[in-house]
Amino acid sequence: MSLRIAILVMLVILAACRSLVSPQRPPNAPAGSAVPETPSPAAPSQPPAPPAPTRQFHLGSAATALVTQAHARAAAGDYPAAAATLERALRIEPENPLTWIELARVQLASGNAAQALNMAHKALGLAAGDPSAQSAAWRLIADSLRGLGRNEEAITASAHAEMLVPH
């Protein structure tokens, strides 16, 4: 009896090894069909991967209220208070590119183009999949670069922004 069990175990092990080494038959191939070792050059290629899904970022209600407050403070010329308010919004939604875009706008309006550029780049990095947010970030990058006197780079950034959002 133990010899039969030993033989049965050996057969199971060999079958498992064979399935790891042998090419597998395609799921739609008939049971007795042979599997070619290399794909045929005439075989149709796989369809291209679908494009990345688009998404659209939105601010939550708390962040929206803070952005509204920041707009009022910036309109009154109180850029430090506007920036502080937007930093509170960032603590609520740190991965939302829209909060970074708003803070970059305030930094640019206050004359801090270098800081605005950094924040716009952060927003761009977070805006994957949202062409509208990416375009807004590229526009801010262009404006920040102009503020820094880097006009050639600003032209390229503006072109990126225009390609993302059709008119």
Image: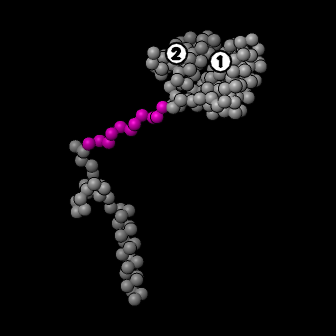
Residue 2 in the image: above or below residue 58: below
Q: Which element type, helix, strand or loop, lies under badge 1?
A: helix
**What is the x, y in percent for residue 129?**
50, 31
Does the magenta portion include 46? yes
Does the magenta portion include 90? no
> In which quadrant will I find the C terminus?
top left
**What is the x, y in percent for residue 52?**
45, 35
Image side of residue 21 versus residue 101, left or right: left
Q: Residue at x 38, y 68 (%)?
A: 16
Q: CA distance from mark 2 to mark 1?
A: 16 Å
Q: Residue at x 57, y 22 (%)?
A: 137
Residue 95 in the image: above or below residue 156: below
The amino acid sitting under disc 1 is Arg
**What is the x, y in percent for residue 155?**
52, 13
Image side of residue 78 versus residue 44, left or right: right
How many numbered marks have been drawn onto this rendered protein structure?
Answer: 2
Asked whether disc 2 touches disc 1, contact meaning CB atoms under 8 Å apart, the reply is: no
Within 10 Å of disc 2 (Cα), the crowding (few <14, some 14-19, many 20+) is some
Number of the label disc, if any, that sits on residue 105: 1
Examine the image and state in which quarter residue 122 appears.
top right
Number of the label disc, if any, that sits on residue 66: none
The mark nearer the N terminus, 2 or 1, is 1
Q: Which element type, helix, strand or loop, lies under badge 2?
A: helix
Number of the label disc, if any, that sits on residue 158: 2
Residue bounds of the magenta highlight: 44-54
The amino acid sitting under disc 2 is Ser
**What is the x, y in percent for residue 63?**
68, 28
> Magenta: predominant secondary structure element?
loop
> In which quadrant will I find the N terminus?
bottom left
